[in-house]
């Protein structure tokens, strides 16, 4: 790991480890260096204990993938001490970094605070939601902190994998197409429910194509926040031959009241899977956004193969 007197480039460094004999040595693990920007997870929606637990699990996964990572949580609609606002988390990250370098200089070390962002802000969103992203950008601007804002997590094959897993957990899809058994309640058409209007529907459609390839059933995206969108898509699927539908929330969880998912499924006359939640891939994708923002290109996380 880089020392306080060495360059603080914000790039991951390799942790030394004993050299393994033979041609098939394991790659040395990456670790975050001192001075690297903080990863700040921007959590949408009303804060709650459930939301906090989900966000903490996501950042825990990111830290396990990149030891030494300074990962923090800021709430778009926060305010209470236990749910700090995104703006306050960014301000605190900047203050703490400045204090560290002031202490180092007071100790006689010839160091200066590194250039570049203090933090990389990653929205905890599977797809684009212009209203929420506007709030995130506003918080970053009002913090007056040098921070980089990344894109949302999707579309990505890992999100298609996560959707597949949630559907299989609900008994609405086979967990593995290669196995010689059927699920009696398996859906023959999937309504992929997003939030964020037409832009979100189009983005969800890309992940929907990946999910359709995994399940070998039609998948169509719809908007939970557009009246009649879910029902219209359900009718299209039924008119094309699908009889047993399932609703798959293309959501991580905090974006919307869970009751709206239940109501939408009832309206469409089908069962619903759980939201993506703290699926392991969510933490890996958040970390991927962070490293890409810093110009780092580690090996990208891969999903489970389609069988």
Image: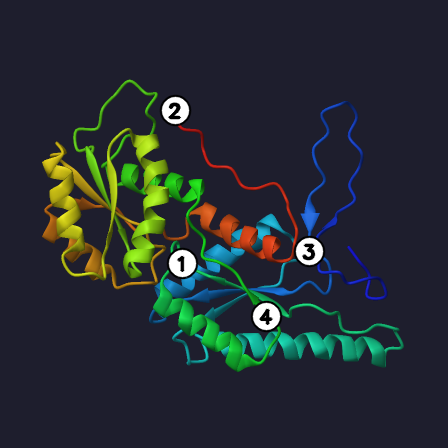
Q: In the rendered structure, are the residues bearing label 1 and label 2 in contact, judged by CB atoms less than 8 Å apart?
A: no
- Secondary structure at badge 3 equals loop
Q: Closer to us: mark 2 or mark 4?
A: 4
**Mark 3 to mark 2 CA distance (whole Å):** 35 Å
Q: Label 4 vs label 1: CA separation?
A: 18 Å
Q: Which residue is mark 2?
A: 307
Q: Are marks 3 and 2 in contact (CB under 8 Å)?
A: no
Mark 2 vs 4, N-terminal side: 4
Residue 32: numbered disc: 3
Q: Count neighbours of disc 3 (C-alpha within 10 A) and say few if under 14, some if 14 to 19, many if 20 or more.
A: many
Q: Nearer the viewer, mark 3 or mark 2?
A: 2
How far is mark 1 from mark 2, CA to CA?
Answer: 28 Å
Residue visible at 28% across and 63% down? 256
Please indicate, yes or no, whether residue 157 appears anywhere in the rendered image.
yes
Q: Secondary structure at mark 4?
A: strand
From the top left corner, tell me how far across and down residue 161 is, in percent: 39, 39
Distance Cα–Cα, label 3 vs label 4: 18 Å
**First along the sequence among labels 3 and 2:** 3
* Mark 1, residue position: 125
Q: Secondary structure at mark 1?
A: loop
Q: Earlier in the sequence, mark 1 or mark 2?
A: 1
Give the CA distance from mark 1 to mark 3: 24 Å
Image quarter of residue 162: top left
Residue 70: x percent and y percent? Answer: 62, 63
Q: Secondary structure at mark 2?
A: loop
In the image, what residue occupies the spot 47% across and 36% down? 303
* Rendering coords of residue 106 (x, y %): 84, 81
Identify residue for label 4.
Answer: 147
In the figure, is residue 235 to the left or right of 291? left
Q: Please state, as top left, top right, bottom left or bottom right, where the N terminus lies in the image.
A: bottom right
């Amino acid at each position: 790991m880089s020392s306080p007197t060495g360059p603080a480039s914000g790039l991951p460094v390799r942790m030394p480890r004993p050299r393994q004999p033979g041609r098939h040595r394991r790659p040395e693990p990456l670790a975050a260096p001192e001075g690297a920007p903080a990863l700040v997870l921007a959590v949408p929606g009303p804060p709650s204990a459930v939301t906090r637990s989900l966000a903490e699990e996501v950042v825990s996964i990111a830290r396990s993938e990149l030891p030494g990572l300074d990962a923090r949580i800021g709430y778009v609609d926060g305010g209470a001490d236990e749910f700090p606002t995104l703006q306050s988390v960014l301000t605190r990250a900047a203050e703490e970094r400045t204090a560290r370098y002031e202490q180092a200089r007071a100790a006689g070390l010839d160091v200066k605070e590194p250039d570049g962002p203090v933090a990389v802000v990653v929205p905890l969103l599977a797809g684009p939601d212009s209203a929420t992203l506007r709030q995130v950008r506003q918080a970053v601007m009002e913090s007056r902190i040098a921070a980089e804002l990344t894109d949302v997590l999707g579309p990505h094959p890992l999100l298609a994998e996560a959707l597949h897993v949630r559907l299989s957990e609900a008994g609405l899809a086979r967990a593995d197409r290669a196995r010689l058994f059927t699920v009696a309640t398996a859906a023959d058409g999937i309504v992929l429910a997003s939030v964020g209007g037409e832009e979100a529907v189009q983005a969800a459609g890309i992940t929907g194509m990946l999910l359709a390839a995994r399940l070998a059933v039609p998948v169509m995206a719809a908007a939970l926040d557009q009246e009649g969108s879910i029902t219209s898509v359900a009718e299209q699927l039924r008119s094309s031959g699908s009889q047993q539908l399932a609703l798959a929330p293309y959501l991580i969880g905090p974006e919307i009241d869970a009751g709206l998912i239940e109501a939408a499924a009832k309206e469409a006359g089908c069962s619903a899977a759980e939201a993506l939640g703290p699926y392991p891939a969510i933490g890996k994708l958040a970390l991927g956004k962070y490293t890409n923002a810093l110009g780092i290109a580690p090996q990208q996380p891969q999903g489970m193969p389609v069988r």
